[in-house]
Amino acid sequence: MVVTSDADGEFPAEAPPALVGPIERGEVDMVQGAGNVIPRLSERFLNWLANRAEPVGNSGRGVRALRRELAQQLEIRGVCICGVLSREARTRGGRIAEVLVSVEHITKHRRIVWYHLRQVFHLLPWLVKRPTTNDQRPTTNTFVLRPSSVSTR
């Protein structure tokens, strides 16, 4: 299993264990941390765009867990993971779910908007690719927003 988290302090250290359970139980291949609000307009746009072909959830959150086999298939090209990681995982047959985690308010540099503008061009090719799977699992999303006891300190 692969667990990633942004190092900016936006997510509590307690978040990763809440993400691992659904993967360990074989319910999904990737679990994303989800918050109630997407703070930046550019992040909301990328998220909207990533969800156009089919739902991939909150695709720009900085905390997630992936089944190792899925993680090894991913190319993850772009200037950030926003939209691309979730779209690519879904296109490769990954079942995605979200766990609600609290988010610590942090100040991000405004220049991230320029990264997000460039990210659109990395995301567009994934919107036209169709999901594939190498096994008998259904290719539809298993999208469940699971309550979590994870909270900010």
Image (spheres, grey):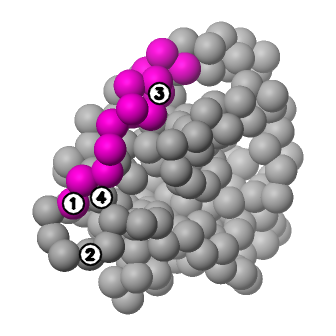
Q: Is the Cβ of the residue at disc 4 closer than 8 Å to that at disc 2?
A: yes
State the mark number for residue 137: 2
Q: Judge depth for marks 2 and 3 and give the one in front.
A: 2
Which residue is drawn at the image coordinates 26% and 75% (left, top)? Answer: 137
Foreground pick, 22 / 5: 22
Q: Residue furthest bottom?
A: 25
Residue 40 occupies quadrant: top right
**Residue type, label 3:** Leu
**Label located before the other in sequence (4 or 1):** 4
**Label located before the other in sequence (4 or 3):** 4
State the mark number for residue 123: 3
* SS under mark 1: loop
Foreground pick, 2 / 55: 55
Which residue bears the numbered disc 4?
93
Q: Is the Cβ of the residue at disc 2 closer than 8 Å to that at disc 3?
A: no
* SS under mark 3: helix
Up/down of 143 relative to 46, above or below: below
Which residue is drawn at the image coordinates 62% and 20% (left, top)? Answer: 116
> Which percent across, then down, holds residue 144?
60, 75
Q: Which contiguous range is marked in magenta?
A: 120-133
* SS under mark 4: loop
Q: What is the CA distance from the residue labelled 4 to the residue labelled 1?
A: 4 Å
**Label located before the other in sequence (3 or 1):** 3
